[in-house]
Each structure stands twice: as C-alpha cells, then as structure tokens.
Image (spheres, coloured by chain):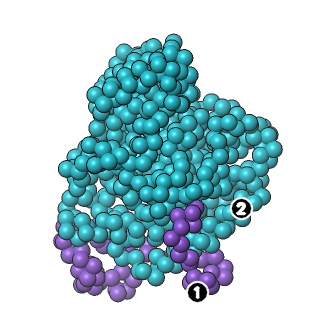
Amino acid sequence: MTELAYLTVAEATRLIRARELSPVEYTEALLARIAALDPTYHAFITVTADAARADAKAAETEIARGNWRGPMHGIPYALKDIIDVAGLPTTCHSKLRIDHRATSDAAVVRRLRAAGAVMLGKLALHEFANGGPTNDLPWPAARNPWNIDLHPGGSSSGCGTAAAIGLAPATLGTDTGGSVRNPATCCGVIGMKPTYGAVSRAGVFPLAFSLDHVGPITRTVEDNAILFQAIAGHDPVDPGSARHTHGDCIAGLRAGVKGTRVGVIAHFYEQDLAADPEQVAGIEGAIAALRRLGADVKPVRVSPLERWMDCGRIIHYAEAYAIHERDLQERPQDFAPITLRRLLGGAFIPAAEYVKAQQLRRVLIEEYRAALRDVDVLITLSSYDLPCRIDDEAAITRTYERQCRMPFNVAGGPAVSVPTGFSKSGLPLAMQIAGRAFDEAGVYRVAHAYCEAAGWTERHPAIAQAARQPAMAK
Amino acid sequence: MSDDGKPKPETLRAIAEMRGLGRALAHAPASVIAAFERGRRIRSFPEGFSPLTDPANRFSADPEGNA
C-alpha cells in the first residue's frame, strides 16, 4: 500500500478526482504525522489543524458534487511563515513579529484557496529569511530530515524538512539568494526559484525587493510544476510582477531531453571555487546520465562566480538593510545575533557600490541571455559542501559564500535544485538546472527526465530514533 | 584606518553612530565590526565595464519592464 505520507501531489490528485482518496482522510493522516514527528523535526511554527479539516471537508463535498477545480483541489500544503494568511501571525520566525496578525491573504495564498488546496500550517525559516539556525528565537530551528544534528539549509528550512520527511507534499518558500534551492539541496528534494516576476510577492515579507522570488519545494519535479502552475501569473499589486506568462509546464513534462542542448557552467565549481569532491561527482554523474538520455552537453563560460556573488550580495545587503534599518537602530537586541550580523552588513555599503551593482547586474543579465542563445538550459552545482552541523555557526556562514545559486537571482531566470545522489555518509547531493526567463517548462522537462532516470527522489529519510512511530499506511 | 586596513575603534564608533547604530554597537560590538569588515565592494568588473552608462539605467513604471 502506498503510504499517504509519501504520496505525490500527482498521485493524490488522481486518487482524489477518482474519489478513491478522501481529502479529509489524507489531511488527517498528515496532521497525525505532523503531531508525531514535528516535535523532533521542528518544521512547523503554526499548525492550522481545524482550518485544514474544514477546507478538506469542503473540498471533499465539492468534488463529490462533481466540481473538481484542478490538480491542487483537496491537496494539503504548507508555507514559509513569511507569507501572509489572513488572521494568522506572519512571524518571519522573529521575536519582532510575535504579535503580528495578517489582515489579508498573500496573492499566492489566494490562488491556492481558489484552487481548493488545504493549508496545513506555516513553516519555520531563518529569521526574516536572512539569519541562520539558532536557539535565540521564540521557535526552534528546523532539523535536517537525513540527520537531525545537521543543518537543513535555509532560509526556507521548514519547507525542505516538511517535504522530505512527508509532513506535506507541497510547500512554498522564498528565494533571494538561494533560499528555496538551499533547503531543497540539503534535504534531497526539488526546489524551484521561478523567473523574477512570474509569481506574485504581494503579501510576502520582503528580504531584498529586486532579488526576491516565491517558489515551490516538493518531492518530485511533477509536483513542483503542478504547484508552480497554481501560483504563477500576473498580479498588478506586485510592482515586479510580469505580464509575460510561462508556458504550460505539465503538457511537455515527459517529452524527454533527446537533442536538448545543455550547457554546463563547470568553471564555477572547478576553477572559481573548489567544491567538495562528492558534490562534483554527483553533478558529473548527472551530466553522464543526461548524455545517455540523448542531451547534447557542452561547456559554457560566464563571468567568474565571485562577480555574480558580489553583485548579488551588495544588492541583497543594501535592500535588506533599507527594510530593517529602523529596528536595527532602535531594538537590535530583539534580533538573534546571527541575523543581526547579516543584516548589519548593509549599513556600511556605499551608495555608489549599490548603484554599480545594479549596473553590473544589467551586464550580467545580458551575459546570461547570451549564454542561453546556444543552449536550452544551463546546469551547475547548487551547494559546494555537504550539510554541516546545525550548531556550527562558522560552517553555516561559509555556506552562504560556497554556493552558486545567487547567479540565478541576479540574472532572474528560473533555476531548480534537483538531487544528484547521496554522499558516502548518506546525505543528499544536488545540482541546479536553469533556463531562459519564463521557460520554467523547459527547465522542468530536463529536471523531470533526469530525476525519473536517476530515481533519487524515490528515496526517503529514515525517521529519527527520537521520533519513531508506527508506520502510517493507507 | 589602522595599518592592517581595519578601522580604528573610534572611527568605527563614529561611523556606526552616524548611521544611528549606537545601540547596536553597544549591544553587539563584534557584530557591528564584523558587518563593517565584510566585503563592501565588488571585487572585479567585466572588461569595459564603466559606471558611466549611456543611456543610464532605465527607470520604468511599467511592471512589464521588470521581467
């Protein structure tokens, strides 16, 4: 029997539509799993059990009447607690927001309500999507599902943990310098940073306006595409929202990669900054697999990683400081020390440097477009290292520099993190697949072909000894 | 600046206070020092890059321009 905890969105949709699975039964099973496991994994800040039961019941009744709204109807999901849900606090995992109440839904929540999805609750993150795991906050830090002593990545840490350990099949995070793809990488799941402007950020607490994205984290590529399709689209309330729309991400998902031109940015991890050999072996195995599937793989060169990182970092720090300046001046003691250190970085960036970073960004965006004239997608590493200990702050700080996710926030194109295997110690490895602006469909197609062939997404973490419970079966 | 390129404590204090960060400096001096010392510059630009751009960075009130 398929375990409900690891049912994919695509499987659940089919069963729910055929009335072989009750959204109420599905939701209850996940709520029970959250109650049993979350005291160990700390993925959730708020569990909205009563509202989830009511939404699941409404979905079941509506579907029974023959009114199936689409693939998210009756599907449970959870979201990073930086996204507004009317009537609930948006804590941003911070003491500064402990008394907050959202008065309206974020645009993505409205879209998911309209799609009939069932919200399970709100997920842990790094404070204001910018700090790190710490015990200095009102809620504990989410744990890595493959080893609870390790960092699950961030800042959408609860999303990665919840998806990987089977607490929610669909989660929504945000990504300013890699915060969807980093937890996806560390937790062995799929994390998509869509094109800048493809998904509305209205009702999402900002980190850095010109780099912020909302993106899905799920266990399979198909599920990720389903969730992306449900949340994407123009929103006049978000000044960065684009009228240009993405293509159909589901229709061509299984078209394969025969003849697809894949450019590998290997200099990022071979020359610019040396990566852990196991991460490199993972991506090299994936490149070989893509070749076997019929892809035309060739090397691609862009600016050195350091230039992309500097450009993104200056913009990120300056914009984040602008948002938090008043609190940093008036109540610095209310931030966790790790957040304070990161946010204060923006206080000392000269205005001229921010202007030059934005000018450089235009040059780099053109370079990115040029690189994608001769190939259909780009691939490169995601993290340079394996997940480190959750209590090793120095190692966690290093992970912010030792990654190549920021280039895609700077360029704005879609980039997805997919697993490339496991280290000798049993930890997930990953790479990124990136594409042209609004070509999420092309990125998902390559990701799906690779993941289906590789099979890494079928492996799930063992439940930690501290959280053992009877297996939950359908 | 001192010989190692780092700011003298009194200089850093003055800069932090100018930015309204006196409380932060008193609460977490090491964090303020670390933030100041963290890279504040772009270390390399592409060949031919100049902050003199013509035309200058575009401003667009049209959300489509942000794509």
Q: Would you say A461 lies left or right of A289 here?
A: left
Element on which disc 1 rests: loop
| On-image quarter of the C terminus of chain A | top left
Query: Which residue matches tag 2?
Result: A371
Query: Does the rendering let one see residue A447?
Result: no
Measured along the vertical axis of the image, is residue A467 above or below residue A324? above
Q: Colour of chain A?
A: cyan
Query: Does the rendering let one see residue A355?
Result: yes
Q: Which residue is located at x 75 percent, y 40 percent?
A: A257
Please give the chain letter of the residue carrying mark 2.
Answer: A
Query: Which residue matches tag 1?
Result: B52
- For disc 1, the neighbor class at 10 Å (few under 14, some 14 to 19, many from 20) is few
Compute the Cα span from label 1 to label 2. Answer: 25 Å
Element on which disc 2 rests: helix
Q: Which residue is located at x 39 percent, y 83 percent?
A: B5
Q: Would you say A306 lies left or right of A315 here?
A: right
Type of the residue with mark 2: Ala
Name the spot of residue A178 as percent of width and height, x first: 49, 53
Name the spot of residue A246 as percent of width and height, x first: 62, 49
Q: Quadrant of residue A158?
A: top left
Q: Quadrant of residue A18?
A: top right
Measured along the vertical axis of the image, is residue A222 above or below residue B36? above
Q: Which residue is located at x 32 percent, y 48 percent?
A: A104
Q: Colour of chain B?
A: purple
